[in-house]
Image (spheres, helix red, strand yellow):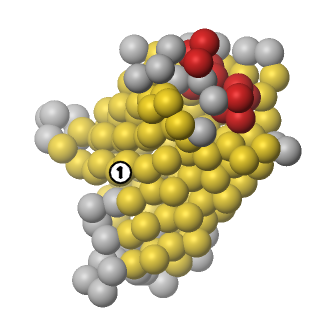
Amino acid sequence: MNSPASLAPNLAPVRTILGTWTGQGAGSYPTIDDFSYTEEITFTDVGKPFLHYVQKTRGPAGNPMHTETGFLRIPGDGTAEFVIAQPTGQAELCEGTVHAEAGSVVLEFTASLLNSATAKQVTSTRRRYEFVGDAVTTTFAMAAVGQPMTHHLRSEMRRS
């Protein structure tokens, strides 16, 4: 991993999100019972003009729940792209914006999805990450299994 001093120039707006963030979250959706979880996300500089991303969640008893991995790209002009693969059979191509100001970074995305033949059908998603100092709040909405775009997840994490 490169030091932040050698970070690719296009990644300057998201320099402050590098590292690991952990905290608590809650989920709901019309087709399932409400639930809580512990979340961890990590953004890593790999010496290229993108960041590597890994997300993991665990249930209240410590049981693994979900994981995903991908790449965050900042092509310029306030645009952001997030390519994410999930073991549940979905691949998300997220396109959106990055807003960086002193002490904060906001990433917002809408996504097109590909679903494997055996996966639950997810039509589209919306993601928002708001980093302020050493805290991040995430929200996730999706249109899936016949439901319209609906709130699904929210978490609040701190830098580990």
Residue 114 versus residue 111 in the image, above or below: below
* Residue at 73%, 15% in the rendered image: 103
Q: Position of residue 64 (x, y in %)?
A: 18, 44
Is residue 76 shown left or right of residue 135?
right
Q: Please name the residue that numbered disc 1 is placed on.
A: 68
Q: Is residue 144 visible?
A: no
* Residue at 52%, 23% in the rendered image: 18
| Element on which disc 1 rests | strand
Residue 91 versus residue 159 in the image, above or below: below
Q: Position of residue 92 (x, y in %)?
A: 50, 64
Residue 120 versus residue 137 in the image, above or below: below
Is residue 70 shown left or right of residue 51?
left
Residue type, mark 1 in image: Glu
* Residue at 39%, 59% in the rendered image: 85
Residue 77 versus residue 157 in the image, above or below: below
Q: Position of residue 29 (x, y in %)?
A: 44, 62
* Residue at 72%, 54% in the rendered image: 96
How many numbered discs sit on the rendered protein? Answer: 1
Q: Kindly give the residue lying farthest to the right in the view shown.
A: 77
Snapshot quadrant of residue 44: top left
Q: Few, some or many C-alpha atoms within 10 Å of disc 1 (few <14, some 14-19, many ≥20)?
A: some
Snapshot quadrant of residue 139: top right
- Foreground: 22 or 59? 22
Locate the N terminus by quadrant: top left
Is residue 41 shown left or right of residue 156?
left
Q: Is residue 30 visible?
A: yes
Q: Position of residue 30 (x, y in %)?
A: 45, 68
- Foreground: 145 or 75? 75
Locate the C terminus by quadrant: top left
- Foreground: 83 or 57? 83
